[in-house]
Amino acid sequence: MRYSQLLGKTVKNVSSDLESRNAELLTKAGFVDQLTAGVYSFLPLGLRVHDKIKNIIREEMDALGGQEVALPALTPKEPWKISGRWDEDVFFHLKGHGDKDYGLGWTHEEIITPLVQKFVKSYKDLPVAVYQIQNKFRNEARAKAGLLRGREFSMKDLYSFHRDEADLDAFYARAIDAYKNVYKRCGLDAYLTEASGGSFSKYSHEFQVLTDSGEDLIFYCQSCRYAQNKEITEVAGGDKCPKCQTGVIAEGKAIEVGNIFKLMTKYTEPFGFKYPDETGKLTPVIMGCYGIGPSRVMGTIAELYNDANGLKWPAAIAPCDLHLIEIKSKDEKVREQATALYGALMQTGLDVLYDDREDKGAGEKFADADLIGIPKRIIISEKTLKDEAVEIKDRATGETKMVKLADLAKELSSYFHADCDCGEEHQH
Ligand code: ATP
Ligand code: MG
């Protein structure tokens, strides 16, 4: 990707409407653009990060046994009347031809339940788990937190259907592990937190990331990580942990990056979704639902991974693997070598952002690279080429080192293979 041609370059002055750190940084770095409060366009660099987060989630949901589907965002009124959620405040309602009522999907239990019902004919068709990764629409009262609270935002919503509670419980426990993997791979330390569960089970579980920009308040054990949302809390700051009996409960602001519920028969009952068991007896299907907001995850990472100069993406979700910076020179050899290096790096399968701009000096290119936050930077200039070398700089630690061009492949393979502990096979 040549920076000279990229749509979405860094922005010097951003609107004072952007009241959150994530929106300010992501806008300045050219990742997103606010259309109106809570509604964002993703520019090429931002879209890459967003897609990488979605792909991590997709891999973990597939591993859990989820089947991906795509449900409509434009939904008719009728199923929402059945569940009683047509009049929810967050619902964007629309009128179609002939005065027909529609609403923009803000969650999809009402759509998925009757869909799955069409295909589940007996106990043999259960369990089944389906998910989608799709934009949701919510008429949020306050949308001032950038990607953390959108009026249009991305959500992965998975729904599971079971014969009985024991089967749901077993799946639910595996879903918790899948969620933990997602956050870990995205560089987030999420607390599994008990939260209000609605009318059908005692608790739901939220995944909460501690940070002062969070809108939620959680109480958590500093020793065993037991946590509860303030809205239901049975513990207080300073208490002895009721779980491990040794740790002390602390209080902290946090961002809810995921929420999972045992819905039991909350939606299957009103839709009359039952299955015949082995004896032919009709039994209500038991259901669970599992949500994550990829755009909120991206905003959370931006809130946590930054410094005064800009973003510092974790490698797994960075827009590119490398940021190649060519320092302009009268000596044509610099351009030749930089172009050749760009081609060679791309050949290895690495994703490279190549700052090939001719009208910008070194200072401005370095400042832009800091703002954009790609983990590894390669600088090629007349000076480095005198030693047949490039300089490599690590965005997170600020460490720099000179590496001979002849040794570069080996050096890079140490970052992109050996250093990796994710246990996955890489394409590069
Ligand atoms: P909140 O309490 O923050 O309003 P919620 O509990 O209503 O969220 P859920 O319905 O549980 O949200 O949605 C599942 C996930 O979708 C949330 O955990 C969050 O990651 C994400 N999400 C929800 N609302 C938004 C939003 N307005 N903008 C971005 N992400 C959101
Ligand atoms: Mg929630």
Image (spheres, rainbow, N blue to C red):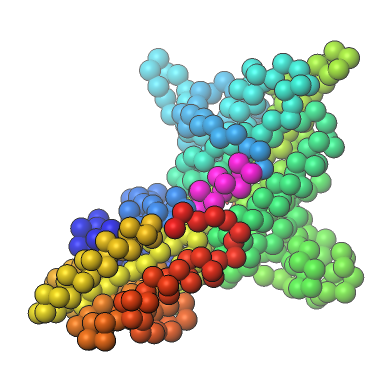
Asked whether, in this view, residue 374 is left or right of residue 66, the answer is left
103 magenta-colored: no
Question: 137 or 135: nearer the eye?
Answer: 135
Total residue callouts: 0
Residue located at (82% from left, 65% from top) = 235
In this rendering, is residue 391 above or below 8? below
Farthest residue toward the front? 406
Residue located at (57% from left, 46% from top) = 59
Q: Percent position (x, y) of residue 28?
A: 33, 66
Question: 112 or 104: nearer the eye?
Answer: 112
Q: What span is colored magenta in the figure?
A: 53-63
The quarter of the rendered structure image containing the N terminus is bottom left
Q: Quadrant of residue 368?
A: bottom left
Asked whether, in this view, residue 367 is left or right of residue 170, the answer is left
Residue located at (45% from left, 68% from top) = 413
Question: 411 or 22: nearer the eye?
Answer: 411
Q: Percent position (x, y) of residue 29?
A: 34, 66
Q: Percent position (x, y) of residue 116?
A: 64, 24
Q: Quadrant of residue 324?
A: bottom left
Q: Main secondary structure of the magenta part?
A: helix
In this rendering, is residue 228 above or below 338? above
